[in-house]
Image (cartoon, rainbow, N blue to C red):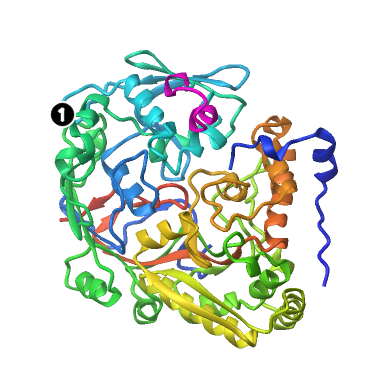
Amino acid sequence: MKFDRRISRRSFLAAAGVSAAALALTACGGSSSTAASGSTAASGAAASAEGGVLNVMLETEVQSLDPQLATDGTSFEVIANYTDGLMQMDSNGAAVEALAESYELSEDGKTYTFHLKDAKWSNGDAVTAADFVFGWQRAVDPANASEYAYMLSDIGQVVNAAEIIAGSKPVTDLGVTAVDDKTLKVELNVPVSYFLSLMYFPTFYPMNQKFFESCGDTYGTSADTVLSNGAFVLTSYEPAATAFELVKNADYYDADRIALDGLNYQVIKDSQQALMSYQNGDLDITLLNGEQVEQVKDDPEFTSVGAGYLWYISPNMDAVPELANLNLRRAITFALDRDSITNDVLKDGSSPAYTAVPAQFATGPDGSDFSADQTKFAEFCAYDPDKAAEYYEQAKAELGKDSFSFTMVVDADDAPQKVAQVVQEQLQTTLPGFTLELKVEPKKQRVQDMQDGNFEIGLTRWGPDYADPMTYLGMWVTGNSNNYGLWSDADYDAIIAECTTGDLCTDPEGRWEAMYDAESIVLEQAAIFPLYGQCNAEMISSAVTGVDFHPVALNRVYKDAKKSV
C-alpha cells in the first residue's frame, strides 16, 4: 500500500535551497473535563477564612531542582513554586509580566529590552539582570549538557546560542546583556512570535551566581541549597524525597496576592493509597486511575483536567535495523487500538491521538486550534488490522523474517504499565509472530536509557513547553536530543528550518501551513506511534479554589489558590 505525500510547500523549499545539514535544531473527553487553561471554581460553602497549607499528591519524585537542567513536569512545577522568570501565565495561559515590570520590542522584532521589578532572593540579594545572564549562559554552556539548551538556540533563536552549544563560541557571546541591574537586553537571530511564552519556562529562569558557586556540587540537594524569588520558599527537601514543604514567601514582590500559607507535597505512587489519603483529609488534591474514576465520577469534587501531554511510542531506528523498515513501523501503528486504550484502560478523560501535535494548546493566526481536527492524519495511524497485516507481510518479505522480538521500556508507574500491557497484547494478537517484552524501570532510568539510545522501543510522553506546535515538531529534526529514535528526513528538516530561521518566520499563515506539512511527514513515515493525549483525573477538595491548570509548560500553578480553613 502506497502513501502519497501531500506536501504543498516541498517544491518551494527545495527551490529555496534550504540545507538540512545547516540545522542546529532540533483533550480531554467528557463534559466534566477542563482541557484548556483554566482555574478551579468554588464548589463548596463559603468559608470564614482563607489560608492554610495545600496538601498535594505527586505521582513521581522530583528529578532535579536545577532550573537549567530539570527536564520533567514534576520538577518544573516545584521549581516554579519558588522561582519566577521574566513572565508568568495568567489564568487563561497568556504571558504576562512576572519579574519583568515592562518590556519593549524593537521594530525589526529581534531585540527585547526587559525592565525588572524590585524583587529579592530569599537570602536578601536583589534580583538583577545579571542573574538572568548567568542562568541563560548556564543553559547553553556545553559543559552542563542541558537537554533544554535548544530552547535558547533552536526555539528562542537567541544570538550565538547555537554556536556556544556547539563549542565554537564562549558563553559570554550569548545574545543576552545586563545593561544595568534592572535592564536586560535580549538579541534574537529572527523574530520569534512566541518568545514571551518561553519566558515562563524554567530553563529561562534567573540564577544567583554567587550563591550557586558557593553551593558547588550540592546545589539543589536540599532546601538550604536553593534560593527563592517566587511565591513560596522551599523549607524541607532531600533528593528523591517522598514528602517536602514550602511556605509563603513574605518578601515576595507580589506577596499580597498569595493566600496560601504553604504547600505540602507527598509522593504517593499507589493510587489506592492516594485516594484513601484524600478521603481521610490528608490530601487536598490527588490523581486517580481509571478504575477509581468509575467510583467517584459523580462526586462534585471530581474533575478531569487536560495535562497537555502526548503519550507515544518511539522506535529506535538506529540501534534496531528491523525498525528502520517503514512497512514494519506502519504495521505496528495500524495495529494499535487507541480507542480501547483510552476507553477501556485509562478511563480518565484521555483522548486517542492520531496527530503528532495534541489539541488545545496552540492557536494560529486566525485564532483556530492547530490540532482541532484530530482525524486529519488518521489515514496514517488509525487502528486498522487489515492494513496492519498487509504492511506486516511486506515487512517480513523485505526483511526475510517471519517473526520479530523487541523489548519496550516503560515507566514503573501505574498508568504507563497498564497501557504497555495492552499495547503488548494488541501487537502480539494482530501481528502473528511478533513478540513484545516489557522492561519496567523507574522513570528517571527509562528516560536516561532512551537518551542514551539504550532501548529498542520506548513508551514516552512529551508536554508542550511553549504555546506553539514547534514545541513538538522541533523534537524530530535530525540530531535533536529528544529524537530518541534517531529518525531523519531531509524534507522534514528543511520545512522546520524554514519555519524557525527562514522567510516563514515573518509569514504566520505560511508557517502554520508548513507545520501541517511537517506533521504529516512524521505520521506518514511512522517516525512515532502516537497513542493518547493525557488527561488527569483528579479529586480537588471543595475547600480549594483558584488552582490554575495549564496544558503548557507548568500544569499546575498555585499563586491564586485559596483554601478555606
Write down the quadrant of residue 127 in the picture.
top left
Write down the quadrant of residue 330 in the picture.
bottom right
User: Which residue is rendered at x = 53% and y = 24% of the image?
Assistant: 160
Mark 1, other Cα within 10 Å: few <14 / some 14–19 / many ≥20: few
Residue 121 position, x and y percent, is: 22, 29
The C terminus sits in image quarter? bottom left
User: Which residue is rendered at x = 28% and y = 49% of the image?
Assistant: 561
176 w.r.t. 37: above or below: above
Which residue was labeled with disc 1?
A: 123
User: Which residue is rendered at x = 49% and y = 54% of the image?
Assistant: 36
Numbered label tally = 1
Is residue 557 at least partly visible in the picture? no
Camera-side residue of 50 and 359: 359
Residue 194 position, x and y percent, is: 55, 35
Write down the quadrant of residue 128 in the picture.
top left
Name the residue type under label 1. Asn
505 w.r.t. 79: above or below: above
Residue 119 position, x and y percent, is: 26, 25
Is-magenta flag for residue 209? no
Asked which secondary structure carries label 1, the reply is loop
Q: Is residue 147 left or right of residue 247?
A: right
Residue stretch rendered in magenta on the structure: 161-173
62 w.r.t. 534: above or below: above
Q: Is residue 273 left or right of residue 304?
A: left
Q: Which residue is situated farthest in the front direction here?
A: 400
